[in-house]
Image (cartoon, rainbow, N blue to C red):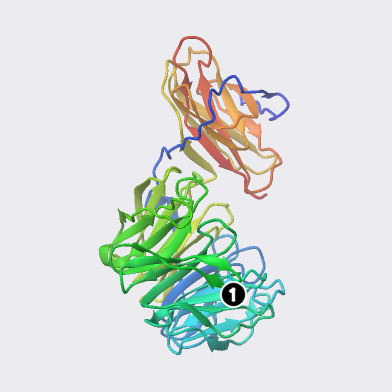
Amino acid sequence: MSARPIRLGSSASVLSFGVLVATTTLLGSARANPLDPADFALVDVTMGSGPRALVLADLDGDGARDLLAVDEFSSRLSMRFGDGAGGFSSLSWKPVGPQPVDLAACDLDGDGLLDVVTANTGNSTVSLLLGAGGGALQSAISVSGGVQPMGLDVGDVDGDGDPDVVTAGDDLVKTVALLPGDGVGGLFAPSFPLGGFCATDILLVDVDLDGDLDAVISDDSHDSVVVLPGLGAGAFGGAVSIAVPSDPRGLAAGDLDGDGQPELFVAASGDSVISVIRHLGGFVFSDAEQHDVGLGPYAVAVGDVDGDEDLDVVAADFGSLDVALLLGDGHGALAAGPLLDAGLGPVDVALGDLDGDFLADVAIVNQFSNDAWVHLAQIGPWIDLGGGVAGAAGEAVLQGSGEPVPHDLVSVLVTGIDRRKKLGHLLIGVERLDAPYKGGVLVPDPLVISKIRPDKPLVFRWPDVPAGASLYMQVWFDLKGRKQATGSNALRAVGQAP
């Protein structure tokens, strides 16, 4: 006899769980099944000659991210347009200034179309390529971009609502350059707010959360990360320097521990580590802590790689020809994940959904094999979040199956329980609670409950929620009485498009 589907919100009951949850102290829930290289499908596409930096952006406005890379050896911008399902168009390109080493995509002229900016170290310029619609770009216009720029970022530094460009270069006097945007696709002449060292990368981020962008720079001269506080109106305050291991290169920022403040990450190539600099408030930072990765990391990116909604760290290891994953637990700890393959000379890495499953994929460019490798995550749509606890009923394991598409049938199954025990309670929520509960973690913030029988699938129709929205599910046994409660692992089910 087939399982009978239930309708969430009708035959299932809506309950108040205030009496069940004693505290709302937030806890992380570790991923029960660690990532494996087999959780990714590789797509290899040719780029130009010597790709040096990579951006994922929807240049043609079709809703799918595209691969944009600057080719240092051929002085070109290479483009492959994504189809939203993990495939890419044939290669197209536009010439830019000599020896481009970094790029950014933004709307410089306010017309709603993405434009591209490149940093060209060969003649100390930046190239501006204004969008013309449908992925087309106008011919590059080059303007002064500081001195031998090695890194570039874009953001509204002066607070006028228009994107500005910052570069950091290999010059001891004019290290950092600020090029204010004019709002119509041009840049004003650069000013030089900081000098005194040779830089390899620059990142704009609001470090102190005051609403003004700050500049973070990799200082290769002194093996440090320099933070330049933004004061608004394009002004900067006195620099703060944090020591890191040798040869700092790529930078990233993100909230690793869930306190709302960004941590800083730097790829320290000389010591083959990723340095994590904890933000302690204002412009006070911890000493850098080190996490081993492969040999000679050139770039670092942050995002949720394993689908548990905690920040993870990804490094492009130039020396060992691989990509290292460091998996976060939401409280600031990082654990070594798998190594993903790379081509010859991986120099940059970016994260983003490239196949339309609402999960982050990993893209890298390889400078000496002239290609981009895209590792498409195959971990969804049912993701194990952990959080369970063994009890009197056994060790409950919750699994899900089916495509979570509105009105389609999906099912959940709990195993590992003595079938003579009473029914369990399947708790479902649209948000996470992550609260300590009966020795485990109550992961869903429960809105719906349904009874569930061990070893018997519970079938229901996926609700009419937007694609990309998640439901969180967990089963508990022996919630009342003196017996030790049993909680299953939690599942995150990510809704998919029809």
Residue 169 in view of the camera: yes
Inspect the image, locate mark 1, and give the three-letter code of the amino acid beneath it.
Asp
Q: Is residue 149 above or below residue 346?
A: below
Residue located at (42% from left, 69% from top): 217
- x, y (%) of residue 40? 44, 54
Name the residue rendered at 47%, 86% in the picture. Answer: 75
**Would residue 367 be seen by someone viewing this image from the given angle?**
no
Label 1 secondary element:
strand
In the displayed orientation, state which residue is furthest to the bottom.
Answer: 123
Residue closer to the observer: 72 or 208: 208
Residue 385: % across, % down = 48, 38
**Where, by quadrant of the figure, is residue 484 drawn?**
top left
Q: Is residue 49 left or right of residue 129?
A: left
Q: Nearer the viewer, residue 266 or 476?
A: 266
Are there few (<14), some (14-19), or many (20+) residues within 10 Å of tag 1? many
Considering the image in quadrants, where does the N terminus appear? top right
Choose top left, top right, bottom left or bottom right for residue 375. Answer: bottom left
**What residue is at 39 percent from the left and 75 percent from the top?**
199
Q: Position of residue 257 (x, y in %)?
A: 45, 46
Q: In the image, is residue 206 above or below residue 448?
A: below
| Image mark count | 1
Direction from residue 420 to residue 140 in the image, left or right: right
Task: Reply above or below: 192 against 291.
Answer: below
Q: Nearer the viewer, residue 3 or 242?
A: 242
**Depth order, front residue of 447/376:** 447
Q: Position of residue 428 (x, y in %)?
A: 60, 31
Q: Residue most toward the front?
A: 238
Q: Residue at x 50, y 15 (%)?
A: 478
- Residue corresponding to mark 1: 164
**Name of the residue lying farthest toward the top:** 482
